Amino acid sequence: MPVAFQETIFSPGEWGLFHITEAEADLRELVPLSAEEARQIDLIQGEGRRREFLAARLLLHRMSGRPARAALFKDSTGKPHLADSHYHISISHTADFAAAIAHPNPCGIDVQRLVKKIERIADKFISPAERIQLKEADKLLQMHLIWSAKESMYKAFGRRQLDFKEHLYVDFHDFHPQQSRATAMLQKDEVRMLFDLAFRIYPNKVLVGCVERVT
């Protein structure tokens, strides 16, 4: 399982991305599952998705530095937690890649493959204030980064009923492809959360991690 990277994010947090090369059987040997996790994976159709399920948990375990793996469980809203840890966590996966983030503050992560069709749905998640930030040369890339940033914030929030266009805002006003940091905000009713974003751009995908800025 080659490590694309594993490093500190907004210290003392950590995030990472793994390239999944192992077969499902090999990953099962590396990832002892709790009874609930075993039940969950038995419901997953498709070897690729089961490999992603296992790889994300293996990545979290390696990031934890623990000798024995702690189970990942979900609360009533579906937000994942790591047993016996005070850190917030988030995971994401796409074909052949798994990503994870852990931080004392609420956090989220999302990895997305670049697809042309995102332009057809952009008006559903990009606000007018965000659209004026788009640069023609980088428009497709920015759309994916905005989507992934909002997916990450949604995960960090941990509750449903968020409108990506109305409640989430990503500040990319000075965007250029060489940058790797930005800021974002979640505003819904009385809830207001400010986020620091870190992102990486690859030839065929983007990765975005967010951490709430707690003052």
Image (tube, helix red, strand yellow):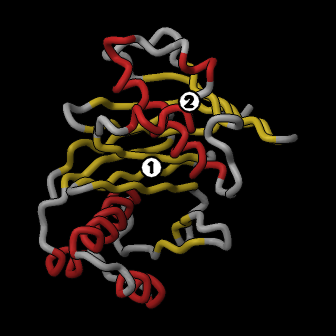
Say whether residue 124 is left or right of residue 147: right
Q: Residue at x 34, y 17 (%)?
A: 138
Q: Residue at x 44, y 49 (%)?
A: 101
Residue designated by label 1: 101
Say whether residue 195 is left or right of residue 110: right
Say whether residue 158 is left or right of residue 97: right
Q: Amino acid at mark 1?
A: Ile
Closer to the camera in the image, 192 or 137: 137
- Residue 28 at x, y = what percent? 23, 80
Q: Is residue 129 above or below residue 20?
A: above
Q: Residue at x 66, y 67 (%)?
A: 77
Mark 1 is surrounded, within 10 Å at the Cα level, by few (under 14), some (14 to 19) or many (20 or more) other residues, namely many
- Mark linked to residue 171: none
- Residue 24 at x, y = what percent? 18, 76
- Secondary structure beneath dot 1 equals strand
- Secondary structure beneath dot 2 equals loop
As drawn, which residue projects farthest toward the right? Answer: 190
Closer to the camera in the image, 182 or 154: 154
Mark 2 is surrounded, within 10 Å at the Cα level, by few (under 14), some (14 to 19) or many (20 or more) other residues, namely many
- Residue 11 at x, y = what percent? 50, 36
Q: Nearer the viewer, mark 2 or mark 1?
A: 2
Quarter of the view holding residue 150:
top right
Quarter of the view holding residue 5:
top left
Residue designated by label 2: 126
Q: Is residue 141 above or below residue 54?
A: above
Q: Residue at x 38, y 73 (%)?
A: 69
Q: Quadrant of the N terminus?
A: bottom left
- Residue 105 at x, y = what percent? 62, 45
